Amino acid sequence: MEVLVTGGAGFIGSHMVKMLATRGYSVVTLDDLSAGFRDAVLAGEFVHGSLHDIAGLDALFSAHTFDAVIHFAGSIVVSESVRDPSKYYRNNLVATLNLLDAMRKHGVGKLIFSSTAAIFGMPQYVPIDEGHPKAPINPYGMSKWMIENVLLDYERAYGFHSVALRYFNAAGAAPDGELGERHNPETHLIPLAIRAANGALPALTVFGSDYDTPDGTCIRDYIHIVDICEAHLLALDHLARGGGSRAYNLGNGEGYSVRQVIEIVERVSGNKVPVHYGDRREGDPPRLVADSSRIRQDWGWIPRYSELEMIVAHAWRWENANAVPA
Ligand code: UDP
């Protein structure tokens, strides 16, 4: 099977490319390197290109016979999406339409799409199941929710089959230490807490300690990058069997507060995490925890690295070995 991975030089994409190659898939990565890293693409063919380049897409699809596309490429920083919605509707919605239309033109009808817990907005209940109302509160979440709807229309009209996977908090690193989380600038809690623990950062700023949670800090559901990628392989199998469109929430189903994450980083590292308590970050819901029972039941997905200690331990090893500047 030949698979196109858009955004294959990014955090989740690079792990996916590696896993696909290990499992015997033929892989092509398409990435514009605006946020990804060429040296993170460890296997397959690499194409430096953009989803905004319609002629380039046409040439790519003419040169290959893709069985499916895994679409990670997109912009992901919530606060930036509020400041610059145009970038998010272009890079997420418009770019995806370009991709879908190239797929249609070339008879490729199977897509796995990176969606997000941000489509739900402020949770009305937790854990959040697939039926929870969708009310995104920022352009990032809205752009992803729009695409989920586009995909359903494409199924009805063109027989296009897709699986939308709504990630909660992707974290960790490859267990063999080969790949890890790389964002520039880094905004995510676990790598920043690790950098505060190993001295690469003077302190971690905790965004708000007056939330309505047991210790006043926000609760999130952290899921290991490898478990996320395994879910994509199950989605590929489903689509290859001719299965119809689906959407699944993807998390461990267990919430950890920012304070608890800090404690685990301190335990794993043996170092203190210097902390500064700051204001709330705009648009942060107090509690986001996934109910992933549907994907467990339908496809037997079981997270292998559900322990947050293990997720942090893999990230800790990666950060120390690679000393990514803050
Ligand atoms: N967070 C924090 N300090 C940081 C980065 C994140 O306190 O420097 C908090 C953030 O407010 C949220 C949680 O950690 O409650 C996870 O944030 P992250 O950016 O990792 O992922 P998100 O939940 O925004 O997707």
Image (spheres, grey):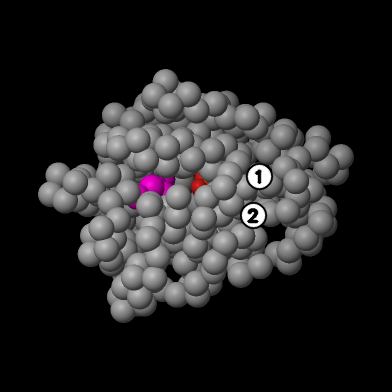
Farthest residue to the left: give it: 157
The local crowd at label 1, few if under 14, some if 14 to 19, many if 20 or more residues have their Cα within 10 Å, is: many
Farthest residue to the right: give it: 270
Residue 145 appears in view: no
User: What distance separates the C-alpha of mark 1 from that of mark 2?
Assistant: 7 Å
Magenta: main secondary structure: strand
Say left or right for 11 vs 284.
right
Residue 32 rendering spot, x and y as whole percentages: 48, 73
Point 34% across, 70% down: residue: 62
The local crowd at label 2, few if under 14, some if 14 to 19, many if 20 or more residues have their Cα within 10 Å, is: many
Magenta residue span: 111-118
Point 40% across, 65% down: residue: 64
Point 75% across, 50% down: residue: 177
Q: Which kind of residue does numbered mark 1 sit on?
A: Gly
Q: Does the magenta run of residues contain 250?
A: no
Residue 263 rendering spot, x and y as whole percentages: 74, 35
Disc 2 on helix, strand or loop?
A: loop
Tell me: is circle 1 under 8 Å from ligand 1.
no
Image height check: is 77 above or below 1?
below
Given residues 276 and 287, the one toward you in this image is: 287
Given residues 256 and 16, the one toward you in this image is: 16
Q: In which quadrant is the C terminus drawn? A: bottom right
Q: How many marks?
A: 2
Q: Which kind of residue does numbered mark 2 sit on?
A: Glu
User: Which of disc 2 and disc 1 is earlier in sequence?
Assistant: 1
Location of mark 2 (residue): 181
Location of mark 1 (residue): 172
Q: Are marks 1 and 2 in contact (CB under 8 Å)?
A: yes
Residue 302 appears in view: yes
Q: Splitting the image into 4 quarters, where does residue 272 fall? A: top right
Image height check: is 288 above or below 281?
above
